[in-house]
Image (cartoon, rainbow, N blue to C red):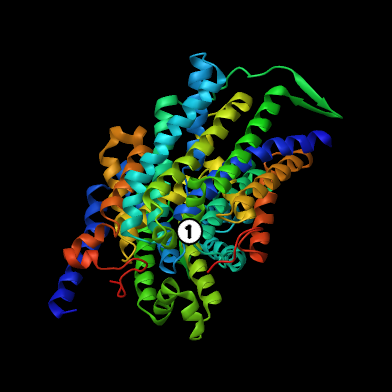
Amino acid sequence: MSDRNLAARGALLGAALLIYLVLLPWLLSDKFYYLGVLTTASALSIIAAGVWLTFYIGRINIGQGAFALVGGYACALLISDVGLSFWLALPLAGMLTALVAVLIGYPILRLKGVYFAMITLSLTETARLAAQSMGVLTGGAKGITSLPLPGALEVFGITLIPDFSTISSHLGFYYLAAALTILTFAAMYRLVNSRIGWLFRSLQQNEELAASIGVNIANLRVIAFAISSFLAGTGGAFFVAMQQSVYPNTFQVQDSVYFMLYCFLGGLGYVFGPIIGTFVLFLSFEMLQGLNEYQPLAYSLLMIALMLWLPNGLLSLGESRRQRRAPPAGRVPDTVE
Amino acid sequence: MEQVIVNGIYSGVQYALIALGLTLIFALMNVLNFAHGQMYVLGAFVTYYIYGVLGMPFFVGLLATAATLCLVGVAFEKLLFRPVLRRSSREESSMLLAAGTALLLESLILIVFGEKHRGVPSVASGVLRIGDAYVPYGRLLVIVLSTLLIVAFILYMQYTRPGRALRALAQDREAAQLQGVDVDFYSMIGFAMGAVLAGLSGAMLVSISGVNSGLGTWISIKAFIMVMIGGAGVVSGAIIGGLILGMLESFGYQFLPGGETYLVIFIGLIIFLSLRPQGLMGKPWG
């Protein structure tokens, strides 16, 4: 990549961050509804990043809703039953979700292709049923409600983050989501461009071949799945804190399918695909407000159109026509940008 | 106890019919038809409309269902899956396309038929008693019709020319093409047959327990469970998987409270698949 190209990309990224962190919150600081929409889009893109990572190792994950639900319930229980502060509950919820993913992942990651897709789809439904039937812990269909807003975060008496009830909580959640999103995608970028990222790519292309040259594929795919679920759990926990409640229906099969759609819309070959896909889709829907009733219909038509005409996602539009056609069937481009 | 077994057979035969359609489409095109449950719901609504609203005979309803689903199947295969599969062999593409068609059918069904639960007057009245078990004639009719359909399907696949072509296609697409099988045409036929099977099972069920537009995803998930138990792409696997799930469900509802039956089934399934990833009758992959 040439220096000029690199500088251009840096400028673009800087401008995007400036708009995201300064301009938008400043413009919308008293328009809570739009602030909420952007916050939701950020949180969804974190969860979608997890789905993207499982695509990256060549698995079709339709179970992200299940893990987001696990994270959400973990966060709610840690706050309401254990009495932890939100700032501890958020990372703990992510880690607990990752732990669950490791336990479930070892057996089910042996499955490939449609089998893996089918079992993960069933997982989403299992999670909902489990939340519904374990009434003692989860409150059954009534869910867990009226969770407190995040309190202050203090280290050695210095207030790092003020109590959300003393400031505009909408703005607070916006910045929290923004921070988490930036952290997530920076980490993802670092991850796929590291050694382990190359190993992940080898899983996507040919697991047997990778295993034959000494890659521990069983461990690697569990690691990828755990990271993916950590993101789902963190995103789910954030959602629950924002809505101050969690129900068995908070994340459903449809949500799991939507996460896939976000990744596809952005482009499976690009780390920033999930965030682009989520924001474009989510925001364009807010602009077409009259369409709300027909949202599933419009989403489905979009999914079908995407597969027919733009199978490599929106970000592939930035490449020349020849390059866009280039990735042969069965793999994504070798370099990830 | 007899009652539980009879209930299991009743659901099992129906489930087998659903799984058969799903596994047929999978075997022919390597496509997991997410819209299978929605096709089932569509079939149920067509029969509801013909038989329940217009008051025509039940069998006219079944015929109309078969015709509608045949059209839907042909359209899906010809307009959507064929171009996408031709261009890309990535499993993700066909999978997302299939999820898209499921969402499309579901939202269209919701817009056209509304979200109310719909039922129709039962087709046959009276009850048959076997030992301690009671079987309403309506259910008996469903069991008999489903069994006949399954037998007809197997005979068609085994002993007719198109059936042989379809089996060849499932075994090896390229070899079938080299032998002069019209691959595009038979893929279309197979997809349409799968859709019709899903629709017909929905049409039969509407006479027993009614239908609503939100049922589709749940039916698809059940169909996936059966196919995972039996093995994807194998006819015997679909039938066995269907019967096993029917029995499990019937026994579960008898002995476990509420929704916990499926929780247990899911957990059992995950353990089962970790021991035997290809299902009971499936071939190990390669």
Above or below A202: residue A173: above
Counting every numbered tag in the picture gives: 1
Residue found farthest to the right: B131
Q: Position of residue A119 (x, y in %)?
A: 56, 56
Judging depth in this view, the residue of A207 and A195 nearest the camera is A207
Q: Chain of mark 1?
A: A
Judging depth in this view, the residue of A331 and A276 nearest the camera is A331
Q: Position of residue A84 (x, y in %)?
A: 58, 58
Residue found farthest to the left: A4
Above or below A24: residue B108: above
Q: Quadrant of the N terminus of chain B?
A: top right
> Is disc 1 surrounded by few (<14), some (14 to 19) or many (20+) residues within 10 Å?
many
Looking at the image, which residue is at 24% across and 68% down? Answer: A326
Residue A166 seen from this side: no
Quick check: A123 left or right of B46? Answer: right
Q: Position of residue A212 (x, y in %)?
A: 50, 84
Above or below A72: residue A315: below
Quick check: A317 left or right of B139? Answer: left
Looking at the image, which residue is at 51% across and 71% down? Answer: A221
Say what amino acid the circle numbered 1 marks. Answer: Asn
Reading the image, the residue beneath label 1 is A61
Helix, strand or loop for disc 1? loop
Q: Position of residue B280 (x, y in %)?
A: 66, 58
Residue found farthest to the top: B55
Above or below B40: residue A176: below
Residue A273 seen from this side: yes
Looking at the image, which residue is at 48% across and 37% down? Answer: B39
Judging depth in this view, the residue of A152 and B38 nearest the camera is B38
